[in-house]
């Protein structure tokens, strides 16, 4: 999610982007004629404060009980647990409309409390004629109704408000991670929520503040499959909820009609071939991670722990430990755990708010 500073009805961009993006996100920040396409700027019209207004991404179209909804994050649609059902959801978001209320496309409907079901997800009931009923996502198109479980090395893409269309690779799965939030738009108490078994896309440039709510999908030319829901990140990594967790938490389907698809369905594509650890190795790595995560999180610089693959030997499973940038390597951090290599990834703290640099402290951005 991203915010802008308001001063005498002017809107100031808090920091310029430092990455090269597919389209810079410019087309994803514009007001669209109805019916809008998704992967676009949007958010709750009440998500503002005296100095800031905040927005994220309206990620995708889903169906529940025969009705169509926009899927995004709790902290985008529900103002981090503070919204009441019926609050207006706009496109574009306030940040891209000089902090004035833009056209309304949906009404906030439902969300699990942050962390309650291990997801940061929410839905908003689409207003008649406001959203493309095919669920078309900018630069991606329509989706397959079937979910694709995340796997190490899987090539993925997303369409979001700030960085537009980007591609990346899943670096770790089953990742336990601590994510920082802020209670208000550009203000308020910061708090941390712990998530289990999340998906992490490796490398910089896949996302930035304002891309929260984007749907992560397989990198297919047509009808890609949902993989995860982007909700947090840093300048080096992006974190997403596994899509089956989101589906089950909200009781939704990615079918755009009430007659096809099924809630919680998973139909991995037979055409996706990935070089990676064998299933038995992954199962062992997951067991090792669970066995040691308490002692690892006791080491102060540790921000997350997951299961990945060795850089030199992709068929070898490793334990991935995310350490805070600038902190010394803990002396008690072993190079191996129960025979598995430990791969260290340095990163800033994972946050669910920020500017183009994900939570840059100089911006007071959400």
Image (spheres, rainbow, N blue to C red):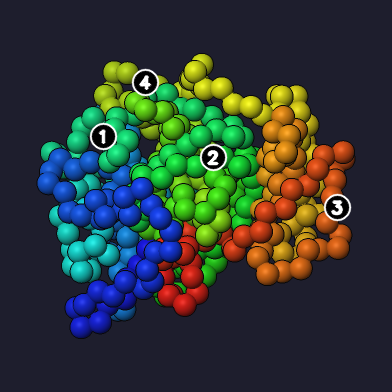
Instruction: Identify the secondary structure beneath mark 4.
Output: loop
Dot 2 falls on a residue whose secondary structure is strand
The residue depicted at 62 percent of the width and 39 percent of the height is 173
Above or below 257: residue 179 = below
In the rendering, which numbered label is found on residue 10? none
Q: Which mark sits nearer the N-terminus, 3 or 1? A: 1
Q: Which residue is mark 1?
A: 136
Q: Which residue is mark 4?
A: 261
Q: Secondary structure at mark 3?
A: loop
Cβ atoms under marks 3 and 1 closer than 8 Å: no
Compared to 1, does 128 lie above or below?
A: above
Residue 174 as seen in the image, left or right of residue 77: right
Decide which of tag 2 and tag 3 comes sooner along the chain. Answer: 2
Does 83 sit above or below residue 49?
above
In the picture, which quadrant includes the C terminus?
Answer: bottom left
Q: Is residue 282 left or right of residue 258?
A: right
Q: Residue at x 43, y 75 (%)?
A: 364
- How far, Cα to Cα, is label 1 from label 4? 17 Å
Q: Earlier in the sequence, mark 3 or mark 4?
A: 4
Could you say where residue 114 lies in the image, as x and y percent from the top left? Answer: 49, 53
Q: Are marks 2 and 3 in contact (CB under 8 Å)?
A: no
> Alpha-carbon distance for marks 3 and 1?
47 Å
Res 192 → quadrant: bottom right
The circle on residue 169 is 2
Residue 45: image x %, image y %?
A: 25, 61
Res. 137 image quadrant: top left
Residues packed near mark 4 inside 10 Å, few (<14), some (14 to 19) or many (20 plus): some
Q: Of label 1 and label 4, which has the lower sequence position?
A: 1
**Residue 7 rendering spot, x and y as whole percentages:** 25, 82
């Amino acid at each position: 999610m991203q915010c802008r500073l308001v001063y005498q009805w002017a809107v100031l961009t808090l920091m310029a982007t430092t990455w090269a993006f597919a389209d810079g996100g410019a087309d994803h920040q514009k007001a669209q004629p109805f019916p809008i396409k998704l992967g676009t700027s949007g958010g709750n019209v009440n998500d503002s404060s005296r100095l800031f207004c905040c927005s994220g991404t309206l990620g995708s179209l889903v169906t529940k009980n025969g009705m169509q909804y926009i899927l995004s994050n709790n902290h985008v649609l529900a103002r981090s647990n503070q919204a009441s059902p019926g609050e207006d959801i706009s496109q574009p978001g306030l940040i891209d409309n000089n902090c004035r209320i833009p056209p309304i496309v949906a009404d906030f409907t439902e969300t699990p409390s942050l962390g309650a079901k291990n997801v940061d997800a929410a839905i908003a009931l689409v207003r008649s004629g406001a959203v493309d009923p095919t669920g078309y996502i900018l630069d991606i198109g329509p989706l397959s109704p079937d979910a694709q479980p995340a796997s190490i090395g899987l090539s993925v893409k997303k369409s979001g408000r700030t960085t537009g269309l980007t591609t990346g690779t899943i670096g770790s799965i089953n990742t336990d991670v601590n994510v920082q939030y802020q209670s208000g738009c550009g203000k308020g108490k910061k708090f941390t929520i712990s998530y289990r078994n999340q998906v992490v896309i490796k490398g910089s440039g896949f996302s930035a503040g304002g891309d929260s709510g984007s749907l992560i999908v397989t990198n297919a030319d047509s009808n890609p499959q949902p993989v995860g829901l982007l909700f947090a990140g840093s300048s080096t990594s992006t974190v997403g909820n596994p899509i089956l967790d989101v589906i089950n938490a909200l009781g939704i389907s990615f079918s755009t009609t009430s007659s096809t698809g099924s809630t919680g369905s998973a139909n991995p594509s037979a055409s996706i071939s990935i070089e990676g650890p064998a299933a038995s190795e992954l199962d062992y790595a997951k067991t090792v991670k669970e066995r040691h995560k308490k002692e690892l999180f006791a080491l102060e610089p540790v921000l997350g722990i997951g299961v990945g693959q060795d850089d030199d030997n992709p068929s070898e499973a490793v334990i991935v430990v995310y350490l805070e940038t600038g902190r010394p390597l803990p002396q008690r951090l072993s190079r191996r755990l129960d025979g598995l290599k430990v791969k260290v990834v340095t990163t800033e703290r994972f946050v669910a708010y920020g500017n183009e640099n994900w939570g840059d402290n100089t911006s007071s951005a959400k």
